[in-house]
Image (cartoon, helix red, strand yellow):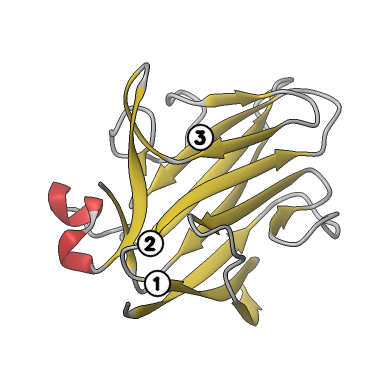
Amino acid sequence: MKQVLASVVFAGFLLGAGPAPGASMGDFIQVEVRPGAGRSLPLYPTSATHGKKKIYAEALKGEEYTVVIRNFLPRRVRLVVAVDGRNIISGQKSWLRNNERMYILGPYETGEYRGWRTGSDRVNRFYFTDAADSYAAAFGDSSAMGVIAVAAYSEIGNSKSEIEISGRGAWSFL
């Protein structure tokens, strides 16, 4: 299998150290990309710029993955999740806004998102791939190719925090 070196970018507006490894927004939300083989992706941190922390993650082309999000808050959070610039529930272009389709994660819950929702009981799996085979290429929009982005909104008010995970290798679905 060919190895893909993906870049991971984290941008959050809530400060503090996360309680566990992965991309965290302060002590509140943690995002992890977990390959189907159950192993952890090797991470290679680089310097932070403009409030965004960038990390490279090494993955295998063709390997399925899951986006795992943990809520460390004692209240529910609303999550907009986008891969390749597309909302994973609706498939529409995502701007990570609070009026988009989103998941609700309960207090201290962990959500696992394995692919594009195509019906109430059907999900097309995410997998690591090259640009030509990506979901972004299928829509002719490479503006967020290789990016996994999560916007978390508090259930009270509309304060927003974002985490972006982006890559040189593209992400796609089966």
- Whether residue 21 appears in this view of the structure is yes
- Whether residue 50 appears in this view of the structure is no
Identify the residue position indicated by label 1 in the image: 60
Q: What residue appears at the point 31 percent right and 64 percent down from the top-left corner?
A: 62
How far across and down, in percent of the image, does residue 174 sit?
Answer: 25, 46
Say if 57 sits above or below 110 in the image.
below
Identify the residue position indicated by label 3 in the image: 80
Question: Could you say whether the residue bearing mark 1 is in a helix, strand or loop?
Answer: strand
Q: Quadrant of the N terminus?
A: bottom left
Q: What residue appears at the point 32 percent right and 80 percent down from the top-left corner?
A: 2
Answer whether labels 2 and 3 touch (C-beta < 8 Å). no
Q: Which mark is residue 63?
A: 2
The residue type indicated by label 1 comes to Leu
Q: Residues within 10 Å of mark 1 (few under 14, many from 20)?
A: some
The residue type indicated by label 2 comes to Glu
How far across and down, in percent of the image, does residue 96 sit?
Answer: 47, 39
Q: Which mark is residue 109?
A: none
Say if 26 sits above or below 40 in the image.
above
Could you tell me how far apart the alpha carbons at marks 2 and 3 are, in whole angstroms? 24 Å
* Tag nearer the camera, 2 or 3: 2
Lower position in the chain sequence, tag 2 or tag 3: 2
Q: What residue appears at the point 72 percent right and 23 percent down from the top-left corner?
A: 106
Answer whether labels 1 and 3 touch (C-beta < 8 Å). no
> 154 or 116: nearer the eye?
116
Lower position in the chain sequence, tag 1 or tag 3: 1
- Looking at the image, the residue that sits furthest to the front is 37
The residue type indicated by label 3 comes to Val
